[in-house]
Image (tube, rainbow, N blue to C red):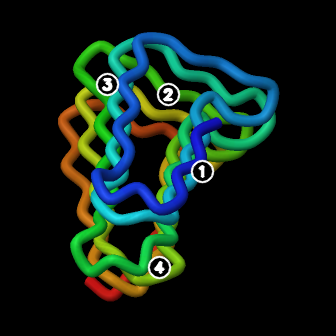
Amino acid sequence: VAHAYGSTTGVTIDAADASGGIYGIKAEHFGGGALKITATGTVKGTVKAGILADNESSSAASTTQVTVAQGASVTGGTIGVELTSGTGRALSLGNGGAISGIKGIVAHTGGNATLTNTGTITGMSMSRAAG
């Protein structure tokens, strides 16, 4: 679990392998700069999400970017990858690997949400976004 308060440079997480009883990777960002998560191996959250990226920054320059690299896998008990921005910041997910969960991807934002997929996504996906 990563929490960032007041950071002006943002948060970057690069994970080869990660697992947890609830989340594989859980990042909450409340400062400036971007929230970036890259998974290059196996990420597993047993109960909830494989990756939860929550950006609550009020900075206009703050964005959220999650990348699942080619050959990587992200699995969640309920959600593969969840991206959230309660402040309407842009969200992006690039998938070259495999994402799976009951819901493969969930994205919540008042801003734009972008998905680039060259891998596989298993489970239904939903998005609440402006664009």
The answer to whether residue 13 is visible is yes
Name the residue: 74% across, 42% down: 48
**Amino acid tagged 4:** Arg
The numbered mark at residue 74 is 2
Of the two numbered discs 1 and 3 on the same chain, state the one appearing first in sequence.
Answer: 3
Residue 26 in the figure: left or right of residue 105:
right
C-alpha gap between disc 1 and disc 3: 16 Å
Of the two numbered discs 2 and 4 on the same chain, state the one appearing first in sequence.
Answer: 2
**Amino acid tagged 3:** Gly
Name the residue: 80% across, 36% down: 47
Q: Secondary structure at mark 1?
A: strand
Residue 104 in the figure: left or right of residue 90:
right
Q: Secondary structure at mark 3?
A: loop
Of the two numbered discs 4 and 3 on the same chain, state the one appearing first in sequence.
Answer: 3
C-alpha gap between disc 4 and disc 3: 23 Å
The numbered mark at residue 130 is none
Q: 107 above or below 70?
A: below
Residue that mark 1 sits on: 103
Q: 10 above or below 15?
A: below
Of the two numbered discs 1 and 2 on the same chain, state the one appearing first in sequence.
Answer: 2
The numbered mark at residue 97 is 3
Residue that mark 4 sits on: 128
Q: Are marks 2 and 3 in contact (CB under 8 Å)?
A: yes
